[in-house]
Image: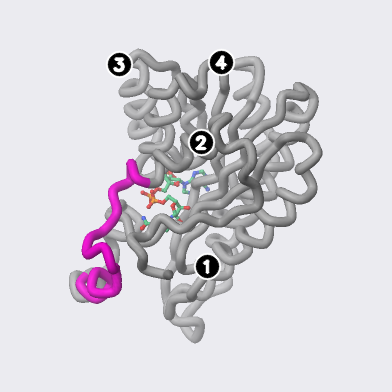
Amino acid sequence: MLLADKVALVTGASRGIGRAIAVDLAANGAKVVVNYHSSAAAAEETAAAIAAAGGEAIALKADVGDLGAAQALVKDTVAAYGQIDILVNNAGTTRDTLLMMMSENDWDTVINTNLKSMFNCCKAALRPMLRRKQGGRIINISSVVGLVGQGGQTNYAASKAGIIGFTKSLARELSTRSITVNAIAPGYFPTALTDVLSEENKKQALAFIPLGRFGQVEEVAYLVTFLASGRAAYITGEIIRVDGGLAM
Ligand code: NAP
């Protein structure tokens, strides 16, 4: 068990990539907090699936874009499992439209959910991680869109590019404490987030993927488990694409 005796908090784990991450961390021995915002039934179902497979998990509601809610989430994690060793900042959303049409609310919602959540959750989790003096792992889910941009996604691209600078800076700040901070930049994975794209857009995206297929959510989860484990102790400040070669 790569993650025996570890406690992981995965934000936005009710479905999609976050759910796969929670399931794989638990399969490797971690006790997992499955965070969600509005999809309570899906989050409970994720926690139940983990338990059915012999793992340990609870579902906790919190809007990670809200500092107070993120602080309460971390407090409840420590109250439930005594510690926090692994924080996976996965929660994310889109409000796609051309900048000319983009409302202030479209901008604020995406920046708060995708980027401010990094500040909120890392700030809250650092205190118990540092107090424990056992190191730790922070893994942030960015996107290839943060690397190369995408028309109709100025808000999303800004949030995902922001995560990259945030990750590298925090990695430097925490380097003496054996807390590693890395980011993953997924390419295209069929989830609720990408379901909204037209068939035409999906076809166009596929044509640009050298490996010739979309990703499977488990292919992000396996990398998260590796980065969360002792095997990745010498990797920090890294941004790793999981994109079938899309943004190489
Ligand atoms: P998804 O299926 O839409 O899942 C998003 C998750 O985030 C849900 O569990 C949702 O929970 C949660 N969430 C949204 N707002 C939240 C908030 N304010 N507080 C707490 N949780 C919140 O999306 P996904 O495709 O799995 O995406 C997961 C991450 O990967 C995101 O950061 C996304 O940007 C990134 N990513 C995805 C792709 C892709 O192709 N799918 C590519 C690159 C990057 P509720 O329903 O309970 O709100």
**Residue at image mark 2:** 10
The secondary element bearing badge 2 is classed as strand
The secondary element bearing badge 1 is classed as helix
Work out how far the residue at label 1 is from the one at label 4, CA to CA, in angstroms: 34 Å
Name the amino acid, label 2.
Val
> Is the residue at mark 3 in contact range of ligand 1, meaning its CB lies under 8 Å from it?
no
**Residue at image mark 3:** 52
Report the front residue among 50 and 173: 173
Which of the two labelled residues, at mark 2 and mark 3, occupies the earlier sequence position? 2
Name the amino acid, label 3.
Ala
**Residue at image mark 4:** 5
Of badges 3 and 4, nearer the viewer stands 4
Q: Pick the quarter of the image with the N terminus.
A: top left
Q: Pick the quarter of the image with the C terminus.
A: bottom left
Q: Which residues are magenta?
A: 203-219
Q: Determine whether label 2 and label 4 are within 8 Å by CB.
A: no
Which of the two labelled residues, at mark 2 and mark 4, occupies the earlier sequence position? 4
Which numbered dot is residue 146?
A: 1
Specify whether 192 is left or right of 7: left
Which of the two labelled residues, at mark 1 and mark 3, occupies the earlier sequence position? 3
Work out how far the residue at label 1 is from the one at label 3, CA to CA, in angstroms: 37 Å
Q: Is residue 156 above or below residue 54?
A: below
Which numbered dot is residue 247?
A: none
Of badges 1 and 4, nearer the viewer stands 4
Name the amino acid, label 1.
Gly
Q: Is residue 176 above or below residue 132?
A: below
Specify whether 217 is left or right of 179: left
The residue positioned 62% from the left and 40% from the top of the image is 138
Work out how far the residue at label 2 is from the one at label 3, CA to CA, in angstroms: 19 Å
Work out how far the residue at label 3 is from the one at label 4, CA to CA, in angstroms: 19 Å
Report the front residue among 140 and 1: 1
How crowded pointer 4 is (Cα within 10 Å; few <14, some 14-19, many 20+) is rated as few
